[in-house]
Amino acid sequence: MGPILTHFKLNASAVVFLLAVSLFSCTSKQKYTQEKEPRYETLDTTSLQANPIAVLAPEDSIKIKSNFELMLAKVEDSLVVWGYPFKEDVLLSSKESYQQHWLLKNYFNKSLIARTKRIYPDVFIPTVADWQKLVSIKQMIYKNGSAYVIEEWVLSNRSAANTWMHLIADARHIDNTKPMRNFWVEGNKIYMVVTLGSTYQRYEHTKIFVLMAGHKPAFIKMMTNPINIPSFKKRVGGAHSGGAKPQPYFYKPDTVGVYYHFWIFSKIKYDKTVKNHFNSLHLTTYIYGKVKDYFNANEELISLKANHSYHQIGKLNFVGQELEELEAMYGKPQLNYKGSSIYYYNKTFLILHNSDQKVDWFRYIRTYTTLDDIENLPSYLFEYGKNGDD
């Protein structure tokens, strides 16, 4: 009996010891996990296209940068090298703050506006409704005696951004284009590069713009704001017109409106150098709200095509131009596709068909399609076609 009892006691002690070690080990592992494992929370993904993802909690979170912040990141290193290490972040969002803005302050000068209206009766001046749609202006000011100002204007919708784009363009009549600035529209936002200083900074101004937008100012203007439609209509007169069929690939603004199609313009239809006026120039726009006034509609360009040279279409007067000259001005096209040079920016396509290295017809069209998905566009967009509304 003695040996048996002794053996039993030893086994019991071993069991107790093993249980203690096991409990200590579990406690230790649990404590380690709590200390090292970061806390997680789920993002509000209403604005994300991807599935919801887990991210670190605020103290360890990953901040998703805005488009404006990404643009600024591209230029700040260069500005420091050029001698502009000091920056100031300003947010304008009230009438009082707009009265201090380098450009908007001019609209509060009644005598200046009255004089401008006398000289340029068609100049755009913001209405009360326009001011209400201006949400804010965010400025990043880089100083060193003179200054560069990079701005993001936020509007209530794309229609308002389109209106303010024309207002800013017409502001050159008010302040004689001083200071130097370049701007473009993306969605409901306007981005602007402003140089407050001497003319020697113009080269740097252009370089900042290219760093931000990825292209020359001339290219961005041509792809985002190639034509002032009210001015164009006054130059070409009335036209045949009618509602345009909404195509699935058309860009659709975020405000209620209707697509409209224009062709055979009265002031150019007697041009004997044009073989077929019915099909030589076609324009499709998106008119915000109801169709009221041909010459003063609130509209923006969706598509334009031409197979004849018309000075009235301004920057889009490509027919007859050498491809080499266009490349010198706008850079090389992003793609050669189906016999055409393709320029692309922000889902907008400029299709330049050429013969003997000269443009013989072109099509400008704003879409939902990226350059990678160009094959999803209908093949007839890469042909001139017999019908205008194609």
Image: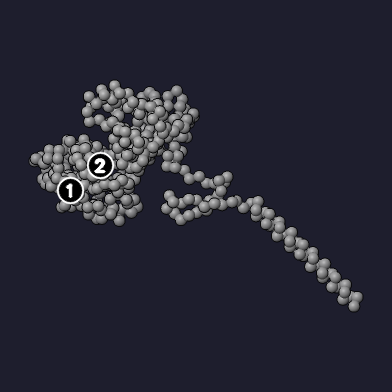
Classify the position of the N terminus by image quarter. bottom right
Q: Is residue 323 left or right of residue 103?
A: left
Residue visible at 12% across and 38% down? Answer: 267
Q: Secondary structure at mark 2?
A: strand
Q: Is residue 368 left or right of residue 25?
A: left
| Total numbered circles | 2
Per the model, the C-alpha gap separating discs 1 and 2 is: 14 Å
How packed mark 2 is, by other alpha carbons closer than 10 Å (few <14, some 14-19, many 20 or more), is many
- Mark 1: which amino acid? Gly
Residue at the bottom extreme?
1
Give the image location of residue 7, x and y in percent.
85, 73
Residue corresponding to mark 2: 299
Residue corresponding to mark 1: 242
- Mark 2: which amino acid? Glu
Give the image location of residue 151, x and y in percent.
40, 34
Q: Is residue 354 visible?
A: no
Give the image location of residue 85, x and y in percent.
49, 29
